[in-house]
Image: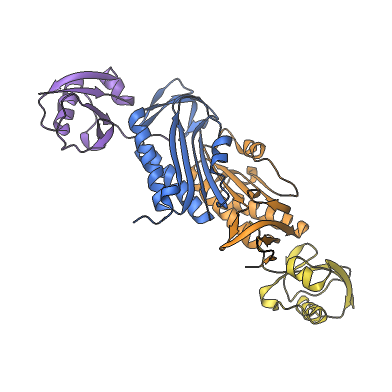
Chain colours: A purple, B yellow, C blue, D orange
Amino acid sequence: MATIRLLYFASLREAAGCDAETVDSAAPDLAALYAETAARHGLAWPRERLRVAADGAFARWSDPLRDGGEVAFIPPVSGG
Amino acid sequence: MATIRLLYFASLREAAGCDAETVDSAAPDLAALYAETAARHGLAWPRERLRVAADGAFARWSDPLRDGGEVAFIPPVSGG
Amino acid sequence: MPDNPAAVSVEARFALAEVPFEIAPLRQGLLLAHAGAYASFEGWVRDHNEGRPVRGLHYEAYAALAQAEGQRIVDEAAARFAIAGVHCVHRTGELAIGDLAVWVGVSAGHRDAAFAACRWVIDEVKARVPIWKHERYADGDAGWLHP
Amino acid sequence: MPDNPAAVSVEARFALAEVPFEIAPLRQGLLLAHAGAYASFEGWVRDHNEGRPVRGLHYEAYAALAQAEGQRIVDEAAARFAIAGVHCVHRTGELAIGDLAVWVGVSAGHRDAAFAACRWVIDEVKARVPIWKHERYADGDAGWLHP
């Protein structure tokens, strides 16, 4: 079981109804963590359209959770 | 016979020793006018490396002389 | 092996700005005696987007990651292109029509590298940096852009 | 048939400047509400050219023809590219190291056209406008550049 700080941005933040939350998860990797999170909040984004960041750097969906870590699901960006 | 105001720029000006002069010429076209001018001043530029302008616009070497006109031989440019 | 052996000495900076910023001093910082060429790009807030009249917008950033990824982009540009300096600043927060949203400035010995690096940086920033645009339309509608 | 149907309303200006000029007000003139992208190029006097230390230079122009040909170039850019405005200024006379020699600014709806037009204008200006550079080198030598 890992304790994770989840960050939400843009439309994901609006869909989740918060900009951050702390969750406990037994998910084996970030992909499974997103599946749990999407189910809990009813997030519509398929994982394939998102990127994931862990502890302030882009990460792979297959990366394991780090207890005490910070994770963000990144919807398509629109800066510039 | 046409009276022509000849303008010289950059290294052509230095080679001619003046920035402008008025000449009378019976040359049938601008190419012949350049040949006369190059011979008179000992200009080293082959005509193929130059462009020619008449009355403030680029012209063709085959254009005839206009009495009272202004002609410039244009060495390769180096602005920018 | 980077294309640019002088990359170690290239000034490469990326920054987020929560309030309007001045380009002039940033450009001045790129004006180096050995650099003969400077190319810049600016993105401004337009009064329309894909045919819809826009009243204003704001940019939200994942600031820590945006800063890190933006810096990675300018560092990559310094290694890829024969440039002397590269600097990019991206606004966050509330912007009005005509406000500057993003600026990229690149100095180089020659114009080929200056143009290429400038174009590459803005393309990468738009593709990779976690910043999101929220537009408000004249008809009262509003929404996040997620291309 | 021009690519840009709005070309008739594009601001297209070319000027020679005998003394240093300010970019800021010129850029401001290109900042139009419907233009989201701005690309610019600046050519500065470098402290070297092809390996030789340069002390300074001057630009000589055939002013009447340079003005006419420069204006023709920006008018062509306005017809070729989907841009909102294009402006180019080229210095003449005596310049020191670090001085601005030429500036091109282009505003457009999108960055593709802004970059493409900016690059095209500086390339055409360098190839077609009757301006000549005379460089003075640190070793006392000097000469005209005729590429």
Q: Vertical placement of C82 versus B41: above or below?
A: above
In this picture, residue C20 sits left or right of residue B17: left
Q: Quadrant of residue D127?
A: bottom right
Q: Quadrant of residue B52?
A: bottom right
In this picture, residue B40 sits left or right of residue A3: right
Q: Residue at x 74, y 59 (%)?
A: D60
Q: Give coordinates of residue C26: x percent, y percent.
A: 54, 37
Screen quadrant of the C terminus of chain C: top left
Q: Nearer the viewer, residue D124 or D61?
A: D61
Q: Residue at x 14, y 20 (%)?
A: A24
Query: Total number of numbered labels?
Result: 0
Q: Give coordinates of residue B35: x percent, y percent.
A: 77, 81
Q: Is residue C19 visible?
A: yes
Q: Give coordinates of residue C64: x percent, y percent.
A: 34, 29
Q: Nearer the viewer, residue C8 or C75?
A: C8
Screen quadrant of the N terminus of chain C: bottom left
Q: Is residue D92 visible?
A: no
Q: Give coordinates of residue D112: x percent, y percent.
A: 48, 47
Q: Nearer the viewer, residue C108 or C44?
A: C108
Q: Point out the residue furthest to the front here.
A: D139
Q: Quadrant of residue D142?
A: bottom right
Q: Residue at x 30, y 32 (%)?
A: A75
In this picture, residue C88 sits left or right of residue C27: left
